[in-house]
Amino acid sequence: MKWKTRVPLTIKMAQEAILNIAAHQWTESEISGYKMVEKESDYGEVKQRWLMVNRRK
């Protein structure tokens, strides 16, 4: 089964993942004003792929 959901920022691993993204790791999105980075996770012994999206103000 494939599905998408938001990783809550109450999860320490998610907080650390966001804080440890270097500027050069971000990729510009095709949608103007957005950038993204993909991270692999093994949260709860389940391999996951997290896509973090940032909207510039």
Image: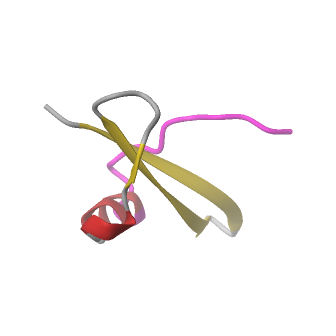
Looking at the rendering, which quadrant does residue 16 occupy?
bottom left
Q: In what quadrant of the picture does the N terminus appear?
A: top right
Residue at point 41%, 65% (across, down): 13
Q: Nearer the viewer, residue 14 or 49?
A: 49
Residue 25 falls left or right of residue 4: left
Residue 21 appears in view: no
Whole-percent x, y for residue 14 in the image: 39, 58
Q: In what quadrant of the picture does the C terminus appear?
A: top left
Whole-percent x, y for residue 48 in the image: 65, 58
Tell me which segment is drawn in magenta. 1-13
> What is the tally of numbered marks visible in this picture?
0
| Coloration of the structure image | secondary structure
Residue at point 70%, 64% (across, down): 47
Residue 20 appears in view: yes
Residue 22 falls left or right of residue 40: left
Whole-percent x, y for residue 38 in the image: 52, 57
Whole-percent x, y for residue 52 in the image: 42, 48
